[in-house]
Amino acid sequence: MNILVTGGTGSVGSRLVMQLSKDNRVFVFTRNKINSDKIHYIQTDLSNKDSLQKVDLNGIDVVYHLAANLDEQDPKMYEENVESTKNIIELSKKSNVKHIIFLSSSGVLGETEEAMEDDAYNPKTLYEKSKTECEILIKESGIPYTIIRASIIIAPNKIWISIIGAAKKGFPIIGSGENKFHLSYIDDVVSILFLVNKDEKATNQIFHVATKDVPTYKDVYRMICDELKCEMTKKHISVFTIKFILFFKNLFTKDPVINNASVDRLVRNRCLSTEKSKALLGFEPKFTTQQALRETIKSLKLIRLGYSNKEVAEVNQLKK
């Protein structure tokens, strides 16, 4: 099978590409030139129609659309995410692609107590609104689709380096910390993305992916400190106060990790039902939040020792 992956050099995409390439010909869109004997990297800009005019997808069976701009403070973020999705749909139609698999966000449903896949859209942040628009475009494209909605993904990346570092330094808990804080682990996300390409029951369906348990925000903070073997802070800071501080801080510098949108996500109730994937696909998440954090911290230690993300993923594959 010939498979195209957008966002194939990111933390989720690179692991997925590694799995897919064992039995398929895999093509990856990238803005930078990359040479590889096994993976076919295509240098192009997904948000630029002129750049995509030179790309020929004839013969591609499946497109995984994982590429996304996550930066809420980038004024082009919304337009880039939506235009990229429009472009990949148009290109897929021209090339008679048989299936689009889209990685979305549980944020399209806003605050949730136990969200089902058919709940009404209720996005709050600009990123969540862009993902909502992308979902609608894909569902209305006429191309068979599968949408995977992940909650915040625990993974060895810059975001979690910052979160874990903040916990180690005793950064105060924002708000009460009692809100439900359902997360997902990168390996579970990759597993369900891989599975839905092989199961016809996944066609024209939306599925949630998240950890086996539903901790609170404070629980997650405690788990991080347990894994780091450091004392957990007892300090709290109100949402109003942190946003007041951020207002003045952002006059001088933009923080890609702590900003108004990320604060809203931290203090919001988030709980997803994953029963649909279990009932329809027989898929269940393998990891609890504690296990996900443990594996992520181990991976970050390997990265500190000089291993690349690709090498860390390969090490994790060997452990399975």
Image (spheres, helix red, strand yellow):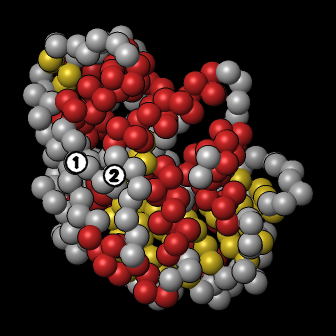
Residue shown at the point (71%, 40%) measured from the top left: 311
Q: Position of residue 48 (x, y in %)?
A: 64, 59
Locate residue 60, reporting x and y percent: 71, 80
Give 318 or 18, whichever is nearer the viewer.
318
Q: Secondary structure at mark 2?
A: loop
In front here: 83 or 125?
125
Pointer 1 with pointer 2, Cβ within 8 A:
yes
Q: Which labelled disc corresponds to residue 260?
A: none
Residue 150 screen position, x and y as percent: 38, 57
Q: Quick check: 184 left or right of 93?
A: left
Residue 68 visible in rendering: no
Which residue is denoted by mark 1 in the rendering?
A: 214
Residue at the image point whose x is 17% and y is 44% from the top: 180
Give the residue displayed 39% in from the left and 25% down from the top.
Answer: 227
Identify whether 249 is placed above or below 147: above
Looking at the rendered structure, the kind of residue marked 1 is Val
Residue 217 visible, this angle:
yes
- Vertical placement of 233 versus 5: above or below? above
**Mark 1: secondary structure:** loop
Q: Residue furthest front?
A: 319
Residue type, numbered disc 2: Thr
Q: Is residue 195 above or below residue 236?
A: below
For the N terminus, which image quadrant?
A: bottom right
Residue on which disc 2 sits: 211
Badge 2 crowding class, 10 Å Cα cut-off, few under 14, some 14 to 19, many 20 or more, is many
